[in-house]
Image (spheres, rainbow, N blue to C red):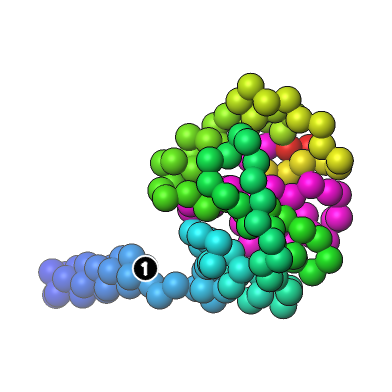
Amino acid sequence: MQVKILSILFFALGLIVYGCGNAPATAASTESPIVQDQAGLIAALQATGATAEITDTVFQDFFSPEGSIIRVNEVDIQVFEYESAEAMEGEASQVAPDGGSVGTSMMMWMGAPHFYKAGRIIVLYIGSDDAALNLFEAVIGQQFAGQ
């Protein structure tokens, strides 16, 4: 009798452990897609109800790819998309923690710089709009450099 009860308990425990390991994704994980590229960033921003559209291109001497200016609600961000995450990380590593320099280039920003990275992109927002900062953190994650 004891062997039968122990067998049932072990079977039940095995089912519980198996079920926990194969649980479906939660709603939170499906609501916050991981941004990998510029198209994914625009989609993620729009999924929050924000407006997001490409308005122009931008060149920064300190980043190798041509960037896009994306108007998000009432603010502009610069998005630089790389061929690989490794290439992006290589250039992101050149940004000083306070955003005051990138490699050997010293910056004189018109506002507070905020650098974000995800997947294959670096996002630069220059400004201090709290709603924009909260949106970017929610969609991209915490800034890796800036003020």
Q: Please, which residue is most extreme toward the top here? A: 104
Along the horizontal axis of the image, is 81 left or right of 86?
right
Judging by the rendered image, the residue that carries numbered circle 1 is 20
Residue shown at 14% from the left, 74% from the top: 4
Residue 71 in percent (x, y) is at 74, 65
Along the horizontal axis of the image, is 126 left or right of 86?
right
Q: Nearer the viewer, residue 12 or 73?
A: 73
What's the magenta region? 116-145
Residue 136 quadrant? bottom right
Residue 49 in percent (x, y) is at 72, 77
Q: Quadrant of the N terminus?
A: bottom left
Work out whether 132 lies above or below 26: above
Mark 1: amino acid: Cys
Residue 98 on the magenta span: no
Residue shown at 64% from the left, 46% from the top: 59
Residue shown at 83% from the left, 41% from the top: 112
Residue 110 in percent (x, y) is at 86, 41
Q: Nearer the viewer, residue 26 or 77?
A: 77
Can the viewer see residue 72?
yes
Residue shown at 63% from the left, 36% from the top: 61
Along the horizontal axis of the image, is 131 left or right of 7?
right
